Amino acid sequence: MRPLPVSVLAAAVALLAAPAANAHVAHTVVPGESLWSIAAQSNMTTRTVALFNGLREDSHVLSGTTIKIPSIPEGQAALRAAGIVPAGTAGAKVAAPASSAGAPRPLGAYVVRAGDTLSGLAAQTGVPTAQMAYMNGVRPTAHLLTGTVIKLPTGAPAPAKAAVPAPATRVVPAADPVPTSGRLGAEQIKALAAQHGAPASLAAAIAWQESGFNNAMVSSANARGIMQVMPGTWDWVNKNLASKPLDPQSPSDNVRAGSLYLAQLLRQTGGDKRLAAAGYYQGLSSVRARGMFDDTKQYVDNVMALSARYGG
């Protein structure tokens, strides 16, 4: 047998040495880490790591959950899938954005600064303290730790300390639903939604837009899980729409809660999917009183495009 040419041997060695395209590694989040710090340690942008994990760039990662660190090819593929051209690919044709990372920021998101109180924030934004406490799953008399992520009323004026840089630490109030590790596939979400009266493709679209199907996600407005359900909404759905108590740690029950709420919005809007999606994001009473905000219009357009992809 003739020996292989040196050029062939060199190519074979190069192939053996090349990293696998699917060579992502799992990283368990430790206290004090953020999505930014995890990405920086891996010499990657926050956007790349966020997209690969189905997260927004401003997502808060919880200690004990797992983040996948992509290989360079995987990271570039995630960017291309989101409609973002990686460096060095100028002029390349890419798909239109269809990712949760391209979604508008949650409305009413606020990070507590030193000196903020729940009653003070409620007064500044024009709602009763009990109402703000209920929506965020805290007691009206609760002391808010600096760095706590909470939801303020949609469209409310910014608190007095909003101009002060937000603290680096993030604190998630201990409330249901509980963000837990776990993902569901689109078909699982569609099946659960259909069982609870919501259009399957619309629910899947909202789930992807909200969390990338990631139940560990907590938004900067204190929404949780695959369907990004607020604590107050979770409690209301449990008391008024669910046929039996929902498990706050279950990814499936997070989808059930979001689907029941979406079905209720559709009943209230006469089956108008665009209006129901707007209500899911902005709040239906706000949409009816003020119309859709620009961010809401972007959210609805994204959801409807995704819904078409999921068979709607």
Image (spheres, rainbow, N blue to C red):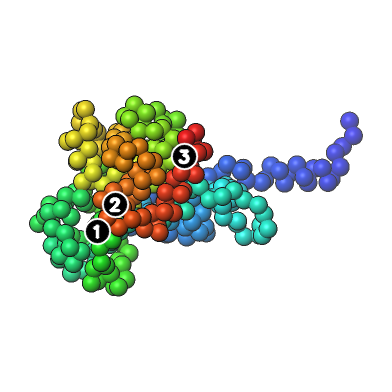
Residue 307 is left or right of residue 122, and the answer is right
Q: Which residue occupies the extreme front position in the image?
A: 270
Q: Nearer the viewer, residue 4 or 199?
A: 199
- Residue matched to label 3: 307
- Cα gap from disc 2 to disc 3, whole angstroms: 23 Å
Q: What percent of the width, then of the height, locates residue 286? A: 27, 54
In the structure shown, which secondary structural element does the residue marked by tag 2 occupy? helix
Task: Identify the amino acid type marked 3.
Answer: Ser
- Residue matched to label 2: 288
Residue drawn at x 42%, y 49% as measured from the top left: 300
Q: Is residue 3 above or below residue 162?
A: above
The quarter of the rendered structure image containing the N terminus is: top right
Mark 3 Cα-neighbour bin, 10 Å: few <14, some 14–19, many ≥20: many
- Cα gap from disc 1 to disc 3, whole angstroms: 28 Å
Q: Nearer the viewer, residue 182 or 232?
A: 232
- Residue matched to label 1: 152
Task: Identify the amino acid type marked 1.
Answer: Leu
Residue 128 is left or right of residue 263, and the answer is left
Q: What percent of the width, then of the height, locates residue 259? A: 32, 35
In the structure shown, which secondary structural element does the residue marked by tag 3 occupy? helix
Q: What percent of the width, then of the height, locates residue 23? A: 56, 43
Disc 2 or 3, which lies upstream in sequence?
2
Residue drawn at x 31%, y 52% as measured from the top left: 287
Q: Is residue 7 above or below residue 120?
A: above
How many circles with numbers are drawn on the protein? 3
